[in-house]
């Protein structure tokens, strides 16, 4: 599962807590703001990973994820 809005770790954690990701599944939070990723990583968490990238140019092959969300991004469009 990929959340392409990062949001300082809140969205990826909420997606797991709401049952969108299984406990053993890795959830990747992606953000272009390094500060948000540092903040997210400092909070720890099981099976959470962080990626610095622009959502319009993600470093993943097509069909790499079963679910891609942009939990907090929609409100910014």
Image (cartoon, grey):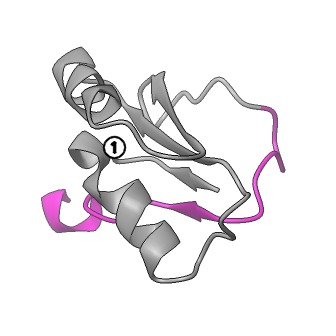
Locate residue 29 relative to residue 11 in the image: left or right: right
State which quarter of the image contains the C terminus. bottom left
Majority secondary structure in the magenta region: loop
- Rendered position, 48 above or below 38: below
In which quadrant of the rendered view does residue 33 lie? top left
Q: Quadrant of residue 64?
A: top right
Residue 29 x %, y %: 45, 42
Q: Secondary structure at mark 1?
A: loop
| Pointer 1 local density, CA inside 10 Å: few below 14, some 14–19, many at least 20 | many
Q: Position of residue 39 (x, y in %)?
A: 20, 28
Residue 72 magenta-drawn? yes
Frontmost residue, 28 versus 76: 28
Choose top left, top right, bottom left or bottom right for residue 28: top right
Q: Which residue was labeled with disc 1? A: 6
Q: Residue at x 60, y 45 (%)?
A: 47
Residues in magenta? 61-77
Q: Residue at x 36, y 69 (%)?
A: 14
**Which residue corresponds to the image point at 54% horizontal and 27% vertical from the top-left?**
57
- Tell me if residue 4 comes above or below residue 13 in the rendering: above
């Amino acid at each position: 599962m990929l959340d392409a809005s990062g949001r300082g770790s809140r969205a990826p954690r909420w997606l797991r807590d709401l049952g969108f990701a299984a406990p053993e599944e890795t959830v990747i939070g992606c953000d272009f703001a390094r500060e948000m990723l540092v903040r997210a990583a400092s909070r720890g968490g099981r099976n959470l990973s962080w990626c610095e990238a622009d959502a319009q140019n993600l470093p993943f092959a097509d069909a790499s994820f079963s679910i891609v969300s942009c939990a907090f991004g929609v409100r910014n469009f």
